[in-house]
Amino acid sequence: MRAVLNAHPSQLKLAKLFSSVILLGPELDEKVVKLIMHLFTPEEAELAQHLPFYYPRSLEKIAHKSGLSKERIEPLLKAMSAKRTILETSKGYSLLPLIPGMFERILMNGSDSAWHQEYARLLVDLYGTGFVRKYTKQKLPAVRNIPLQKAVESKSRVVNEDLISEL
């Protein structure tokens, strides 16, 4: 567990948080710690521990909970939001689970930087441990058909591109 030895205590605490059964997280091990070290600087990890999962918390409440000023934490929150490691909404900031959640936000924005490639490599390594299987007892299909007992009319036509918005 070399990564654990190099990790800042705040990154270790955050890795433990992401390993929660409530979030369908993986077991806390070196792979999780490496991923968290890649996603969060020690300073970001310290602040991220004060964010809730799913339900955004306001800047004021995060400042109060962390004991830091709004002026100090706002740039950190904005930086994490720009990296898409946290969710920013009009109501505030929150954490998302690793899968599903953060995975989609980070990789589905079209970026292909070295940082994104390393994130994908670390995530594939973690996913390869099969941790998701401990939460599912049966195979889940990726696509599911739901019969409607109704015919769907197909309408194919050629239209002027200016009229597409009217369809």
Image: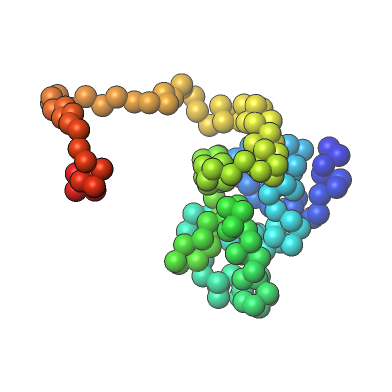
Residue 23 position by quadrant: top right
Residue 108: x, y in percent?
A: 52, 42
Determine the residue located farthest toward the top in the rendered image: 139
Residue 21 can be seen, yes or no: no
Q: Tag count in the figure?
A: 0
Residue 77: x, y in percent?
A: 61, 64
Q: How is the image coloured?
A: rainbow
Residue 64: x, y in percent?
A: 61, 75
Quadrant of the frame with the C terminus? top left
Q: Nearer the viewer, residue 123 or 27?
A: 123
Q: Nearer the viewer, residue 3 or 64?
A: 3
Q: Residue at x 55, y 72 (%)?
A: 59
**In the figure, is residue 3 to the left or right of 65?**
right
**In the figure, is residue 12 to the left or right of 81?**
right
Q: Residue at x 74, y 48 (%)?
A: 37
Q: Nearer the viewer, residue 111 or 158?
A: 158
Q: Residue at x 64, y 69 (%)?
A: 75
**In the figure, is residue 30 to the left or right of 98?**
right
Q: Residue at x 70, y 42 (%)?
A: 114
Residue 166 can be seen, yes or no: yes
Image vertical order of residue 11 relative to residue 25, above or below: below
Quadrant of the frame with the N terminus? top right
Residue 126: x, y in percent?
A: 67, 33
